[in-house]
Image (cartoon, helix red, strand yellow):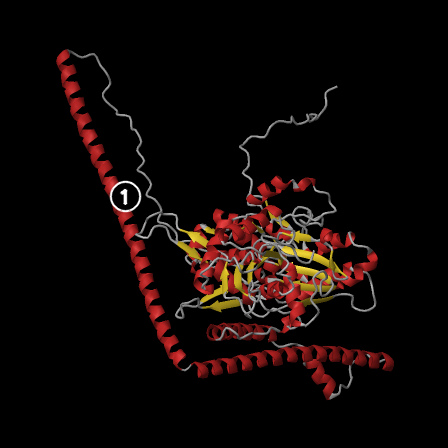
Amino acid sequence: MAQPFKIAEPKKKGKKKGGHKKRSDVNRMVAAEKLNKVSPRIATYISIAAPKSRLPKKHYCDITGYPAPYKDKATGLWFANSRAYTALRNLSHAQSDALLSFRNGTLAK
Amino acid sequence: MPTSRVLVIDFGCSRLRVGWSNEDKPRTDIPCMVMKSRHYGAGDNGPTIKIGNDVTESDLARGLVRTGHDGVIVTDATALSLMLDYSFETDLKLKTTLKDTPVVITEAFCNISGARKLVKDLLVETYGATKVVFIVDILTHLAAYALEQSLPLQRDAMPCSGLLVHIGHVATTILPVIDGQPIRTAAKRISVGVCHMVLRLQAALNLRISTLRVVGFQEATILAHGLIYAAEDFDEELSAYKELQEDYEPNTMLEMPPKAEPGLHSFQPLDGPMQQAENEDQKEKRRAAAAERMSQMREEMRKKKEEKESELRKADEAKYLELKRRQEGEAERRRKKKEEREAEEAKIRANLEHHLHGLKERHISLSTQIRELTRRRKQLAQRGTGATRARLEIIAKQMDSGDDGSDIELSEGEWNAYLNVSPEDIDEKVKQLQEEVDRVTVEIQQWDATFVNREPFLESLTVPTQTLIGDFGDPHKTFVYPIGVERIMATEALFKPYLLGITDAGLGETVSFILQQIPATTQAGLGNVMLCGGGARVPGLTKRVAREVGPLLPYSDEPNVSVRVLSEDLGAGWAGARAVSSLVDWKTMKVGEWENFFG
């Protein structure tokens, strides 16, 4: 019997493309001392890193900063109201990218 | 061996402080920055190296600056050695090696031993130090506090217990201390620090103001001191800002002149004579005539094309000239305006106090007018309710008497109350006055940056000003930055790191993780929250931390959390390291030995 949908095939596991990522100085030090294998009863540089956040994320408007219920799919920016949306549509690519960089981790690096 | 003098080095992520233990203040206090110019041998003196305060904003923007750290860990001994050389030469005037001088140096909490070895090797091999002691930088703040409060300082116990929160330059570390013993396994480090707050503010400012002027990191750091604060309730504060309805104006670009469209050419069929039966002469004649006509037509087409092109060129030139003229005219107008403004400013500057006084009086009179109008509106509303009551009484009278209402006697007061129901156009008046007040406020703030216009609805919240004005080195120019929600957004990253794209848990969530590892019977002692580090001085942070941490602790009738800043002094880390240096028994220390204090 023909099925109306296609059964998804499991993804093939393979080597990722691209070169080996360069390690930072700290990561090299951590690897040299094998801190991953130290028992958790001893506090190390790795064990005291804060865990990942489990709380739900709240979205804030990228233009006004207020709580934002809507997202613009073209730019990926969140907006709070129509006024923010009109401002958002008038942004240049560079400006919208700069706004995006606030919360996609490029600032923190 | 003279043990009275110990070299104390506080090598933080943001600043390097070096000094002697027998002096109150560090001799060197510079930002941790080393810049080496890229062009080798460009001048006669070869490559230049700039250190500390000499590093300029443009060097920072070019990204050649090293701090010696990767995160909180020291990875670059060369940078440290350059900075120490600078300090020893200019401030300490050190001429010999450190052979007879014991050294105390701070390190990050839970430092990697490789990084510690790096620093120790540098001190021992390059500078010839024989006795080096490492102290955890968070705990030095506690030692400095103990010194201030004259609490007993011991070798193996902390002076006080509670939750120690160190908000540093690149990371925030939380360490629970119970009964004087730090619980290292329960400690956590969040990778959000002061520099993240400053970066967020800098990026927001750069997006807000003209593209011609760029706020650098150092300038943003100065701005952040008076600008950022922590909101006690973030969403409530946001709604307060929402009422301000500030305008967002994205940078407008100058429109470029449109490009001239290339001339459109279309091929037109030549309608020649119908091919007929003809003899050779006729054929040749016709061909010659056709060739002549063709050449004529080609000539005509060429001429037409040239004419068209020249027309287009002329139009382009005319457009360009007009645009240029317009720009020049605008520039001249602007220059004139600027001159006028400068003349006015000079006039005002000559008599600034009088001018300010007049402006402030005007502000006061306007705001009192607004207040009276709003009070009048309130009164009218009350009268309205009074009038309806009067009307109801009339109806009740009518019902009682059984009349049809033709001859009801109204008292004069009732009638006046009835007339006064219709409100006047107070709203518009208030709006106009409010605009005037805003204008006057901005004008005052141009001259007096400390002036604060307190809006009535903001009285309960702490939102001082919308704009910040500063002249950075150039007193003739003042820059006005419209700034709003960014003031709290920058600090909010500490509690919601995902605002900056960092996956770590926020401060409140991390404290809840820490409490899971500590038995419930001892949790009550952690209500004593001690903030230290450079970020602890952010205004409003104590209230916010109390709000985040309080509900997590075991319930009690009394307020179960008290948050305080250990020291307002920025050099508390160095002072603490200096205090600890007196605890070390330098005589029994062996050559090259190092030890770690407070666990």
The percent position of residue B138, horizontal first and vertical second, equals: 64, 59
In the picture, measured across the screen, residue B361 lies left or right of residue B325, that is: right
For image coordinates 74% across by 77% down, the residue present is B385
Q: A56 and B343: which one is in front?
A: A56
Q: B373 and A78: which one is in front?
A: A78
Q: B210 and B550: which one is in front?
A: B550
The percent position of residue B4, horizontal first and vertical second, equals: 57, 67
Is residue A70 placed above or below B349 in the rendered structure? above
Is residue B597 placed above or below B404 in the rendered structure? above
Residue ID for mark 1: B312
The 10 Å Cα crowd at callout 1, few under 14, some 14 to 19, many 20 or more, is some
The percent position of residue B101, horizontal first and vertical second, equals: 54, 60
Amino acid carrying label 1: it is Leu
For image coordinates 74% across by 47% down, the residue present is A41
Is residue B201 placed above or below B23 in the rendered structure? above
Q: B408 and A15: which one is in front?
A: A15
In the picture, measured across the screen, residue B586 lies left or right of residue B479, that is: right
| Figure quadrant of the N terminus of chain B | bottom right
Q: In the image as oriented, which residue stretches furthest toward the front?
A: B1
| Figure quadrant of the C terminus of chain B | bottom right
Q: Chain of mark 1?
A: B
The percent position of residue A104, horizontal first and vertical second, equals: 58, 47
